[in-house]
Amino acid sequence: MNTVITGASDGIGAASALELARKGHQLILVGRTPSKLSAVADQVAAITGSRPGTLTGDFTSFEDVRRLAAELLDRCERIDVLINNAGVMSTKRQHTADGHELMIQVNHLSPFLLTNLLLDRIRESSGRVVTTCSRAAKTGRLDPADLSRERRRWSGWLQYGDSKQANALFTVSLAERGIAATCLHPGVIRTGFAPGTFLMKLVLHVPGMGESVEAGAARITHLATHRDGVDHPGRYFAGNVPVTVPGQMADPELAAALWSASLAATGSANDRSSASG
């Protein structure tokens, strides 16, 4: 199985890479920091005896995402699993060079663009797409006409919830296009994610508040390897089972509106792969 993992340089992405390596997957690890990727690749090589491919990718830049997609297509004759795991949470409003709020670009628009650019290869391989979502998606109030919350009240957690709701709706749209796509809440995990926030301080320092990165990785790995990742397209998983979600996470009309808005935002309306299906 040829598997691409974004956000693989640390946290649950790195732990997922190690678990998938133990299960015999051939990996390409994608992350921002070459030195961190190299360290994870060393750990994978210690398990498998061969070093996985590594590629850098900066999700704050659509240009770099396009470059990454081209390299992946050049390297991978098959893509059996794409794991969209890269993500960010910031309590400070920031904008990318592409003009979008940081979290909506890194958590949704760039994974949307990358997946679409790889979609034909994934479809040819009868592959699956697994996206790391969050229970924060349940708080999302996504407006496809205002993805960066320029015209609505902004806070870090509100925007994060919108971006995670977008993950769930993107999963719905991929399933409607015949892709074995699922998303999941990995759990409340003890990592360096959302540094400095009160919630993560509690998770890191209060006993019993958080789980290990291995626990989160096991849930990602489940959807990457188990029949559940194929048999429940479009669904959101928690605790390795598909669960009922609020309407705003599963509404096909909202998902379609988000798809159109995302095509426009990424400038990919003319990409052949974006029109596939």
Image (tube, helix red, strand yellow):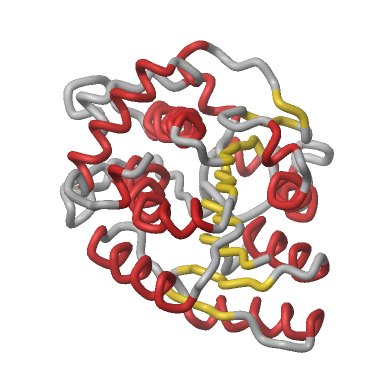
Picture quadrant of residue 62: bottom left
Look at 44% across and 22% down and name the residue there. Answer: 140
Quarter occupied by the N terminus: bottom right
User: Would residue 98 appear left or right of 204 to someone viewing this image?
Assistant: left
Look at 55% across and 56% down and name the residue there. Answer: 82
Picture quadrant of residue 90: top left
- Residue 264 at x, y percent in the picture: 18, 39
Look at 28% across and 43% down and name the residue there. Answer: 275
- Between 49 and 15, which is closer to the camera in this rendering? 49
- Between 115 and 203, which is closer to the camera in this rendering? 115
- Residue 49 at x, y percent in the picture: 78, 88
Seen as rendered, the residue at the extreme top is 247
Look at 65% across and 15% down and name the residue there. Answer: 244
Picture quadrant of residue 5: bottom right
- Residue 210 at x, y percent in the picture: 75, 41
- Between 168 and 119, which is closer to the camera in this rendering? 119
- Between 45 and 233, which is closer to the camera in this rendering? 233
Q: Is residue 155 above or below residue 69?
A: above
Figure label count: 0
Q: Is residue 84 above or below residue 161?
A: below
User: Would residue 221 appear left or right of 69 to someone viewing this image?
Assistant: right
Residue 204 visible to an observer of this rendering: no
Residue 32 visible to an observer of this rendering: yes
Quarter occupied by the C terminus: top left
Q: Is residue 264 above or below residue 117?
A: above
- Residue 63 at x, y percent in the picture: 23, 64
